[in-house]
Image: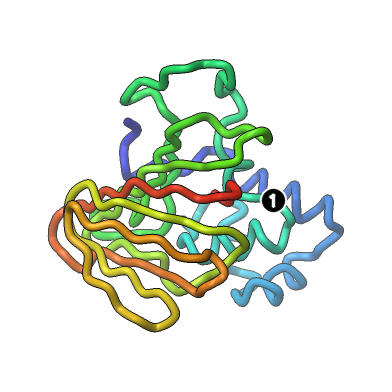
Amino acid sequence: MKDSSSALPADLGLKLRHMRTLHSLSLKQLAVTVGCSESMLSKIETGKVNPTLTMLRKLVDALGINITFLFSAEDDRNAVVHRAGERPVIGVGRSRFGAGIMLERLPPASPQNLLEANIHIVNPGGSTDGAFSHVGEEMGFVLEGQVTLVVEGTVYELAAGDSFAFRSERAHEYRNDGDQVARILWVNTPPTF
């Protein structure tokens, strides 16, 4: 697995800038749409700032793409087995341990997939930094650690072995308030990350 302090794809900002340009949006227009400053958006596009998961979600929604677009396009979509340590990982947000949340892609991204599965690796202090919603449904299983899941304002404290499921249209967010890394097997349909 990649180093958690540098898990963002090197070309994340370039891809976001390219999509913004294709949509003929100025920095200011996109910043207003996603609720951040032009300066913050510029720093994300130039790789100086690591966006939170909520900000990244807002950006990809506004640009008509999904987070899968930001993963490497070099995945072998015909492979049956995906070895530990060789799967793509993207890091978002910040914590005192590097990236706040890392998403480890289980199967490669493909437009033909009906499901999407990732392991959400949430460092202590890592969070989505706000709630978001989207089309679909999701479910998860806490593999290790503890995580606080908030769905439409209701707080759920989850530990290893706990699972959850809900419609993705319900505003949701999560965070790791503990002092150990949390790992969650997270499945979405349709693919959104």
Vertical order, 100 against 148 (above or below): above
Left or right: where 5 falls relative to 37: left
Vertical order, 44 against 171 (above or below): above
Can you give x and y, in whole percent of width and height, for residue 161 in the image? 19, 52
- Label 1, residues with CA under 10 Å away: few <14, some 14-19, many ≥20: some
Can you give x and y, in whole percent of width and height, for residue 181 in the image? 20, 52
The front one of 175 and 34 is: 175
Q: Secondary structure at mark 1?
A: loop
Vertical order, 78 against 132 (above or below): above
Left or right: where 148 falls relative to 146: right
**Residue at left offset 60%, top offset 49%:** 190
Left or right: where 151 falls relative to 64: left
Residue type, numbered disc 1: Ile
Question: Dividing the picture into quarters, in which one does residue 59 lie?
Answer: bottom right
The front one of 10 and 162 is: 162
**Residue at left offset 67%, top offset 61%:** 61
Q: Residue furthest left?
A: 179
Q: Residue furthest bottom?
A: 153
**Residue at left offset 34%, top offset 46%:** 185
Can you give x and y, in whole percent of width and height, for residue 106 in the image? 43, 33
Can you give x and y, in whole percent of width and height, for residue 9 in the image? 51, 39
Coloured how? rainbow
Q: Residue furthest right?
A: 24
Q: Which residue is mark 1?
A: 65
Q: How many marks?
A: 1
The front one of 162 and 51 is: 162
